[in-house]
Image (tube, helix red, strand yellow):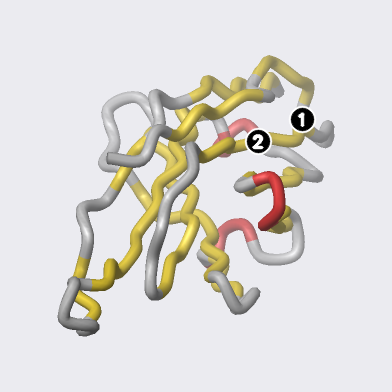
Amino acid sequence: QVRLVESGGGSVQAGGSLRLSCVASKFTSCWYEMRWYRQAQGKEREFVPSIDEDGRIKYADPVKGRFTISQDTNMNTAYLQMNSLKPEDTAIYYCALARTIRLPAGACIDGPDSWGQGTQVTVAS
C-alpha cells in the first residue's frame, strides 16, 4: 500500500487561494494517476482533478479555470492550486493514487487504490 499525506488545507475568505500538497511514499507502477477528491458535509465524495504519469490532466467542471493540478515526479508529490475559492468549495480534500502494477511475468494489472487521510478546506463567505 502506498502512503499518501496531504497538507495545505485551512480557512480562507471567498476569493482567496490555497495550495494543497500530496506526498506519496515510493512506489512502482506500469502507470499511475494522482487524483484529488473532496467531500462536503452531508454529501458524497466527488472527483476534483487528476494527473497521470504522462501529465494528462482532467478537471471536474465546477473547478475548471480556478484549480490547477500539477506534480513533481522527482518528489512523488502532487499539488492542487486552488484560486478564486467559493464557499461551495468547502470540504475535506483527499488525495488518491490509482496505478497498475507489473506482474513477474510482465503483464500489468490494476493495483490497489491508495488514499490519504484528507485535509480540511473551509471557505468563508
Q: Is mark 2 on a helix, strand or loop?
A: strand
In front of the other: 15 or 101: 101
- Residue 93 on image: x %, y %: 49, 34
Q: Of the numbered discs in the image, which one, if any, rests on residue 14?
A: 1
Q: Of the numbered discs in the image, which one, if any, rests on residue 71?
A: none
Q: Residues within 10 Å of mark 2 (few under 14, many from 20)?
A: many
The residue located at (80%, 44%) in the rendering is 84
Q: What residue type is labelled 2?
A: Ser
Q: Is mark 1 on a helix, strand or loop?
A: loop
Q: Of the numbered discs in the image, which one, if any, rests on residue 21?
A: 2
User: Which picture quadrant has residue 108?
Assistant: bottom left
User: Which picture quadrant has residue 43?
Assistant: top left
The residue located at (60%, 78%) in the rendering is 54
Residue 39 vertical position relative to residue 100 in the rendered view, above or below: above
Q: How crowded is mark 1: few (under 14 residues within 10 Å), some or many (20 or more)?
A: some
The disc, 2 or 1, on the residue closer to the chain's N-terminal end is 1
